[in-house]
Each structure stands twice: as structure tokens, then as C-alpha cells.
Amino acid sequence: MRVGWIYPRDNRCGIALYGRRYTEALAKLIDVFSLDASEAVSPGSRESVRKCDLVHVQYEPAHFVRGGRDLYRALRARIPRPLIVTLHEVYHEFPGVFPRSAIRGRGPVRWLRERLYDLRHPVHTRYRKHVHARFGAQRIVVHYPYQKGIVVDQGIPSGMVEIIPHPTVTPPARNPVPRERPDRRPLHFGCTGFINANYDYELLFNTLQAIEKPWRFTWIGGIRREEDRVLLERIEQVVRARQWEDKFSVTGWVPDGEQMDRLADIDVYLALFVNRSTSGSLLM
């Protein structure tokens, strides 16, 4: 059996890490042909996809929008085989943007507002259209029952949706690092992942400010998108203003093995998320 696996292969993101681990595990059992999401719509990929018995797409709407072009629709037209789609981020309303369902008005006024909204939010618009088309898939995979409830509410037939728990990796055994006695070292707090607006940094700062015992905090990760640099700079400004430079650190992106080591050194993991559909880092 030959399976085509389409995911953002070259990106430093959780979906890419998930895809690499999944395909490495499957390769021990079946023939797996992997394609980057951006390569999958190229003319040269057509014949490779046709040779597969089954195709799987790790879906993230932002990976399939280029300007005004819907790359996912183009990709689906090229796949003559049964298709399975895994959804990672599933929300009733995507966080961080005004919900389309809250648009008000009557007749032409509402219609115009909705058209303007769709033009200004191409990723969300494409996702809504892909849901309406049931992603052109035979099966849709989500990780949790509540996610299935959301996509069923959005119009996907319940029988199409499979719940497969988010895979986790057991960290390899490591030699324990000698540590100071707990009463002689600061409490080590931390979190991991990309710097993003779905984390409550204000709550984090207020929590750390209220802790009376000595502490240090490590954010294991960095920014994924250049537009998140503004948020990182705001975090750094707060750290300087509170004179926390010697006990609050942001590592930037780190390799998988180093991430495991740093996680093992944390005493308390502060998962202060405002919105989170699923998180490989949190599960790890």
C-alpha cells in the first residue's frame, strides 16, 4: 500500500513536527510518499499522487491560500484517490478576528458587509468553503470529541468524522542532571511553543509578580511569523521594566531533543492559553 502524505514539511511548526513523526512511524509498515503542502499543487506532483492508493492531508487553511488563489481546491482536483483530512485547529469561531456570524444588517447592506469581510479574511473564507465542500474527503480526522462536535455543527456528517487522539512521543531516558536542593534553588516555571496572541502574557506577568519565593521562567520557543515580533518586543519591554532580565528568558526556536531536555528541567508548566484547540507542545 502506498500512501501520499501532504503537510508543511519544511516549516518549523507543530504540524510539520507531527507530520515528520507520523510518516517516520508509518514508513515501518507501509510505503509513504510525503509532499510539502506547497509542492502538492505543482505539475510535477500529479503523477506521484496518482500512484498512491490513499492520500492524507494535514490541513491548515493558511497553507493553502496564496493571494486570491485557493490552492486546496486545486490540490483536491488533482487527487484521484480516496482522501483523508486531519484537522488540527478547530473552532466555532476563529480567535483573534471579529466573527462573521456577528455581522448585522438587512438585505444589500448585510450582503455587502459579508462580501467585504470575506475579502479581508481570505484564510477564514477558504476554510468556510472547504467545510461546505466537506474538504472533498472520504474521512475527516480530529483529535477530540469536542472538535468533532464543532465540525458536525458546521455541517459535516457525523459518520465522516473519526476521532484519533493526538499522538504523543515518550521522551527518551536521559541521565539525570544533578540539581540543587529544592529549598536552595528558584522555582523553575515555563511554557513551550511559538510566541502567539493566544497566550495570556498579562496573566503570566501578574502571576510571576505575585510569587514570593525565588523563581525563574523559561519560554521554550520563539516567533514563527514576522508579524509576531511586535508581541515578542512587548514581552521584552515588560521584562526590562520589571528588571527580570536575569530570571525571564525566551530561548528562540530549539531542536526537538533540546526542547525535551528543557521541558524536563521545568518544575511547573504554565499553560495560560486564552484559546487553544490542541497543542502538541502541551501534550509533550
Image (cartoon, helix red, strand yellow):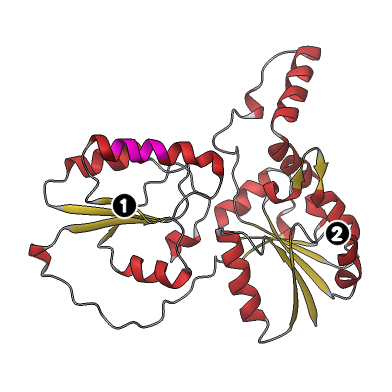
Give amino acid for label 1. Answer: Ser
Residue at position x 45%, y 47% from top? 195
Q: Is residue 233 above or below residue 87?
A: above
Q: Main secondary structure of the magenta part?
A: helix
> How far from the left and from the top, in percent, is residue 185?
13, 62
| Label 1: how many Cα within 10 Å (few below 14, some 14–19, many 20+) | some
* Nearest the eye: 15 or 85: 15
Residue matched to label 2:
42
Q: Is residue 186 above or below residue 274?
A: below
Q: Is residue 41 above or below residue 181?
A: above
Q: Are marks 2 and 1 in contact (CB under 8 Å)?
A: no
Residue 164 appears anywhere in the view: no
* Nearest the eye: 218 or 93: 218
Question: 158 left or right of 74?
Answer: left
For marks 2 and 1, the one nearer the N-term is 2
Residue at position x 61%, y 71% from top? 20
Magenta part of the protein: which range?
233-238
Residue at position x 55%, y 43% from top? 226
Residue matched to label 1:
249
Give amino acid for label 2. Answer: Ser
> How far from the left and from the top, in percent, is residue 91?
59, 44
